[in-house]
Amino acid sequence: MGGERHEPPPDGFEAELDQIDALNRMAAPRPGPPDRQAPGDGTAQEAARRRDSLLLAAGHAVAAADSLDEALKLVGALYAPDFPLDGQCVFGSGEGMLNVLGQYGFRPGGADRGFRMPMTAGYPAAEVARTGRAVYLASPQEYRRRFPATWHMSAGKNREAWAFLPLVTAGRITGVWLAAFREPMEFTAPERSLLTTTGRMIAQVLERARVSRAELELSRGLRLSMRTDGPALTGLSVATRYVPTGGGLMVGGDWYDSIDLPNGRLALVIGDVQGHDVHAAGLMAQLRTAVHAYAAEGHGPDAVLARASRFLTTLDEDRFATCLYIEADPSTGDLHIARAGHPHPVLRTPDGTCLIKHISGGLPLGLMPGEEDYPVDIVRLHDDEVLMLCTDGLIENGGRDMYSGWVRVRDAFSPGPVDDLEAMADRLMSAVLSLEPGALEDDIVRDGDDIALLLLRRDPGPARAEVARRRLMLTVGQDQGQGLAEARAELKALLHDWARPDQVDTAVLLATELLGNVLVHTDQDGALNAYVTGETGRRRLLVEVMDRGDELPHQRTPGELASSGRGLMLLDILADQWGVRPEPEGKTAWFALTEAPPADAGDTAEA
């Protein structure tokens, strides 16, 4: 696998290697006077004590190793005249192939670079990986006799003995450790014991490295999932940032989200799960998904947080999370806000004034099951106003308390034009993460909590002027049989100037079906809301029918003689859009139609 290489250890290992060398010198046998030293007297005991000293010192160093390469370098210090360890390699297996995970003492770029060998090959490491039993080769002759097909891979490398040991974690073989020696070895019981113990230490380092890689991949995937290009809704702009400053992962328990809601509104979420470890990151991913699902179902801010709190309790009773949830109406700038123990948002007015916007709130999510009560505050965001949502890491990073941290954020948030929201976000992050005056150049502000930041701006412009709107609201009770006829008449009146009469008939038919389903299949009253928005010729009709029943309708395929079951089929065929969403109490079925241009004479004749 390449020629020899003897390099001085890196700076990080000097202390450990000095300790090992000192123990080696102390334990080395000292020659006595010729007439008093009997041949072999005490040699075995001295060798055993020397190995014990070496193993003890190396064991402490290897146990603290952060990587496989570091561990192999430290194990290399076990070299002694009667234990001439000269090179090491760790093999892993996957997809039926043997590959190299790490090495020490071989020439860079040797045969082991890109090494891949079938697990069925007659190679000592492959046999160990298959059987779990160590292979000891005390000489080149034994190597050639036992493994004639592959012995040439190690021939001519100035090595005379080899040991291949399984690396076992929790009863599972995770790798194979090769220890090569420059002189023939007998592999006595003490030597095999030393190799076996060392192999256990390397297996622990290998497992820690694999766990660290898994955690890194998890955090990287979660961080990528939080990337957003902002909403595609006219009238609102969003900028987001995420910086992991604590815990060593690429993502912790902080998160943000931007969700397009079925009613044309936008949901904005920011939250922080307790802790900075991989468990917090995993809980964050599940909680974020749950909040997204509750929002997409159409629940209000208070109901979303209440459901998320109960969901978190089922996952982990020892962790809690703070969260702030906003449902934004782009057409009016109205923000419906619910808060669960999270820091208050900050409002920046067009002249740069920054105000902490105090929002009513409830307990953090998952803190006290059964006590979920999250009042909703309504805030109107005006043109060129910016609302900042953040986790506490933005305020307290770098050892700041809440007051001094708020002053730093305010000073970075106030100046500058409001038209470049991304630059504003960059300025805030730079102010928080930059070095304090007098700090050393090598210092990095990484001693605080993770940071999640979300900026929301209401954009000015004539395109967002008040939209022409008609609205119809009525309720049909279970004991009001004439209510359906009255609802049809009022809906026709609402659409009196609609360009296509056939669309008016469609709207009346679908609304009748939705109301009829409520009256027939539940014991609840049916409430109908209808909205007409937009300019004549391009208007949009939205009809919503609500009831307090919990059972959701299901689409069926009724036969020709069936007397019911066609309502959802009609919606699917005739409506431009439709859906059913759960509400905090009951459900809402809705459909939308877009005004089509008037049919000309040719179309009428052809029809």
Image (cartoon, helix red, strand yellow):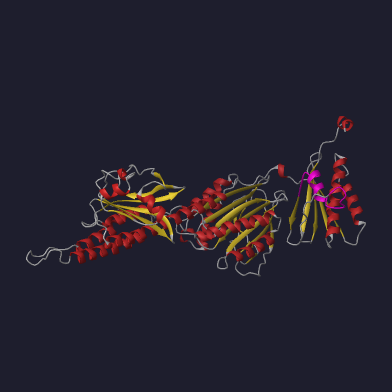
Asked whether residue 364 appears in the rendered view, the answer is: no
Q: Residue furthest top?
A: 602
Side (left or right) of 548 relative to 354:
right
When asked about the image quadrant of residue 504, the answer is top right
Task: Judge by depth and name the residue closer to the eye, 563 or 422.
Answer: 563
Q: Which residue lies furthest to the left in this view?
A: 35
Task: Judge by depth and name the residue closer to the eye, 301 or 430.
Answer: 301
When asked about the image quadrant of residue 76, the answer is bottom left
Side (left or right) of 192 relative to 91:
left
Task: Judge by depth and name the residue closer to the eye, 370 or 558.
Answer: 558
Q: Residue at x 92, y 53 (%)?
A: 485
Side (left or right) of 41 relative to 54:
left
Q: Which quadrant of the rendered structure holds the C terminus? A: top right
Residue 502 in percent (x, y) is at 87, 41
- Magenta-drawn stretch contains 320: no
Side (left or right) of 601 relative to 144:
right
- Magenta-drawn stretch contains 562: yes
Report how many numbered discs are placed on residues in the image: 0
Q: What stretch is highlighted in magenta?
A: 559-578
Q: Residue at x 27, y 46 (%)?
A: 5
Asked whether residue 252 appears in the rendered view, the answer is: yes
Answer above or below: position of 439 versus 47: above
Residue 457 in percent (x, y) is at 63, 49
Q: Which quadrant of the rendered structure holds the N terminus? A: top left
Residue 64 in percent (x, y) is at 36, 60
Q: Which residue is drawn at 40% across and 44% down?
A: 116
Residue 313 in percent (x, y) is at 61, 66
Q: Which residue lies furthest to the right in this view?
A: 482
Task: Judge by depth and name the residue closer to the eye, 527 or 383.
Answer: 527
